[in-house]
Image (cartoon, rainbow, N blue to C red):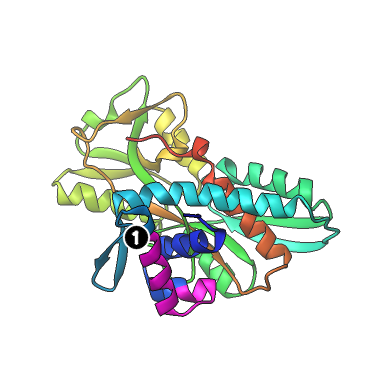
Amino acid sequence: MDLAPDILRTFASAAQTCNFTEAARKVNLTQSAVSHQIRKLEENLGKALFERVPHGVILTRHGESLLKYAKQLLRLHNEALASFSESNMNGQIRIGATEEYAALYIPKILKRFAEKYPLVQVDLYCERSNELLKMLDKGKIELCLRNTKAIESETEFLRKEPLIWIGPKDATPENESPLPIAVFNKGCIHREWAIEALEKNNIDYRVAYSSPSIAGILAAVTSGLAVAPIGTSTLISGLRLIPHKKLPALPSAMICLHQSKCHEDSIQSHLVTHIIDEFCDTSILPAQI
């Protein structure tokens, strides 16, 4: 059998949308054609890739395994095609990202993008997830990389980002009552999930520090005066992971890419490809907690 790029692209779209109808829209096929391709793929591999659930599908263990390979194969396929084309593309693209993702992922993405499209001007905006979506809706940016509570339609799902509790290396504020926490300003899902988990487990807390930036949150924790909920990718040296037996487990956020409509050979579509390729790199996956 042959894992053709078009079949892998259909599979990846179905995995990202968790819905064959939505996947069909993304790959310009009918829903029945998507179902047929997935069924044939499952028959050829001899493994079930999806579990049918109300209102959609979810990946099985074998499906999750294939998705990792599919992303890498599609990335190599796109790179191979791109290596044989020259581009004098120029213009401007505006992208938004949360502060932590701008620091963690955007530098590599922009470096690789600039090497291929040196004449394109990229404007980067850092904001909270909800504000980024508003900017996209108002046409102030063309792309945004943000956290969501669940995989949404018309988005490109990139990765799960588990949330963890962190504390300072040389202090134990998690032993205090009420528990001092450092969180983003109101409207952040990290803040909402942390407070919800504490209240559900009857843990007294107080918001000791609030900041619109990850730098402010990390500074409050490093000072030794608070704990904070952050994504695993943000964990840095000098901070300590607080185990679940001490503080309640937190859910995972979904890192998703939202974009406005564009044509296939636009600056935007090429930057989207670079972003997806970066998240296909398994070397930057967050640590397993």
For the C terminus, give its image quadrant: top left
Count of numbered tags: 1
Callout 1: SS: helix
Question: Can residue 227 be seen in the rendering of this structure?
Answer: no
Q: In the current view of this chain or complex, which residue is farthest to the top?
A: 170
Instruction: Give, as a three-letter code, the residue at label 1.
Output: Glu
Q: Residue at x 25, y 31 (%)?
A: 243
Q: Within the image, what quadrant is residue 85 found in?
A: bottom right
Estimate the x, y position of residue 8 in percent, counting from the top left.
Answer: 49, 59
What are the residue bounds of the magenta stretch? 24-41
Classified by dominant secondary structure, the portion drawn in magenta counts as helix
Does 139 appear in magenta?
A: no
* Residue at which label 1 appears: 43
Q: Residue at x 24, y 38 (%)?
A: 179
Does 35 appear in magenta?
A: yes
Estimate the x, y position of residue 119 in percent, counting from the top left.
Answer: 84, 55
